[in-house]
Image (tube, rainbow, N blue to C red):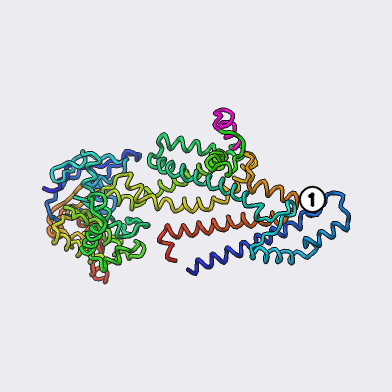
Amino acid sequence: MTAFFKRLALLLVTMLLVTALAFAAFTVIPADPTASILGMNATEEQIAALRAKLGLDLPLWQRYTTWLTDFVRGNFGTSYRFSMPVEDLLRPRVEATLALTGLSFLLIVAVSLPLGLLAAHKEDGLLDRLVTVCGQVTMSIPNFILGIGVIWLFALILGVFQQKYVPPEDGLWAHIRYLLFPALAVALPKTAMTVRLLRGSVLGELRQDYVRTAYSKGNAPRAVLVFHVLRNAMIPVVTFLAMTIPDIMAASIVIEQLFGIPGLGQMLISSIGNRDYPVVQAIVVIAAFVVVACSFLADLLYRLMDPRIGGR
Amino acid sequence: MMLEVENLSVVFRDRRPPLTAVDGVSFQMGEGELLGLAGESGSGKSRTAHAILGLLPAAAEVSGGVRFQGRDLLTMSSVERRQVQGKDISIVFQEPMTSLNPTMRVGRQVEDALRVHTKMAAPERKTRALEAMELAGLPDPERVYRAWPHELSGGMRQRAMIASALVLRPRLLIADEPTTALDVTVQAKILDTLREINRKEGTAILLISHDLLVIRNLCTRVAVMKDGRIVESGPVDQVFQSPREDYTKLLIASRPTRKKLQGGGSHG
């Protein structure tokens, strides 16, 4: 239990550090939001007045503590550019990105677990070799090229994909159906990696003594695989999957641009360009939280799955 | 005869040159008999045992005959053989540390053969598992049933292995160096337990060991293996007192007796 609270404290410290660093980073890049709010022809007085109003004339540490206390109270601030609460601005975008990330993750799990098991079950069989070759290819191609490939194949050649974003308001199924294609581009490389990892992990476990014990009890090869090997082989895979969620989210942010999905990625880039600090800061918090929470989750799952570690 | 091994050979064709691990081994075992298979490491005694149960890797080429209760285990299909494994013939391995599944509770592993061979419901499986654990000399079976393997000592793990092998009351138990990884006091107790099982359940035991004293402690007959062949066999006392082969004499002498440890004996 103390280990749990230690991890929790570490999580909070990490979040503090990341947000502070993000805050400091803005003082390094030139120009400030007044230029994008007031335009090029603003007078000195106008700029000074606005800076005072936004609190930009205060020293950095004071601005950070103000932001932090507001944030802890649940106030994310107001977007300079859109003059609306950051929360309302980001909510639909977070939903879009999370939908794409979640769908990609599900694809990875649903495809790689059976494939990895089958490839290991018939080592060096046709499926094993096919999976290895496909894996090498998809792993060595960047996501956005894969995205272009997906558009080319499904929209232009097969014609099963209409390249116009469907928001969830227009029907959940249509929304998911649209997201399936960008999710494919996000998921392919990670799927290949997961298959390889699981295959190797299963093959390693199959060489263990307890497998021979299982066979000596009259277990059929499939029962040995499912009842005895699977849990042991999944320990590194589950950890990998949890740690990979931030990567999937990062890849989603890239793929969003390609498929015209109004998610966090588009928002982040335009907000940095316009020095819309409250928006950028909120996105940084979300991203940092995902990374830290996933490593927390990986650790937790590892402890749950391996009884040799769980006790400590 | 319950078990008839005839001219059994095991060749590994994937080695260069091909390795003959077992070379024409023949022996027989009656119901409830205690037979020892002795020999130094690499003599083929473990390979012989694994060949009987069909546990050798795919690269091993097995020839000859292994008849158990009149049926040839080598020629039957893998489905038929699985019906014998863990039900009529069980095996206990040398390494209790690695032979148990680290992420499965001990109770479930003891029950494994029940899950494979019977349609028993969970509560009945547990009752049978607890019985087997008691028979294997495990103290506090209820607690051990819920324990993870890493929570047990080496001796307890080996007893859990024995319990899992006995849960269906097989006619033949193969014990492959069951005490080698354990310290001497635990060794003696495990051998006592095996003797008890033989007496109570009438289970025949094929004990494989490099240690002739361990075999003498439990078995009535012994077969001595060298380079994949049986070089000498007979009643344990006879082989011990007047070994015909120099190799057997060496095996007997290589065991440090109390006398030698105290510095009073001859060299060996």
Between B221 and A230, the residue placed more toward the observer is A230
Q: Please rate how many residues cluster around mark 1, counting C-alpha atoms within 10 Å: few if below 14, some from 14 to 19, many from 20.
A: some
Residue B226, position as x, y percentages in the image: 23, 49
Q: Quadrant of residue A172?
A: top right
The magenta segment is A147-160
**Residue B185 visible, this angle:** no
Is residue A151 left or right of A311 when viewed as pictured?
Answer: right
Residue A149, position as x, y percentages in the image: 58, 34
* Magenta stretch, overall SS: helix
**Residue annotated with mark 1:** A36
SS assignment at label 1: helix
* Residue A157 belongs to magenta span: yes
Is residue B88 left or right of A184 when viewed as pictured?
Answer: left
Between A183 and A192, the residue placed more toward the observer is A183
Residue B155, position as x, y percentages in the image: 29, 64
Amino acid at the residue labelled 1: Ser
Residue depicted at 43% across the width and 41% down the height: A115
The chain letter for the residue carrying disc 1 is: A
* Residue A60 belongs to magenta span: no
**Residue A83 visible, this angle:** yes
Is residue B235 left or right of B228 when viewed as pictured?
Answer: left
Between B209 and A136, the residue placed more toward the observer is A136
Q: Quadrant of the C terminus of chain A?
A: bottom left
Is residue A80 left or right of B147 when viewed as pictured?
Answer: right
Residue furthest toward the front? A170
Residue depicted at 21% across the width and 62% down the height: B131
Residue B256, position as x, y percentages in the image: 25, 65
Q: Quadrant of residue A67?
A: bottom right
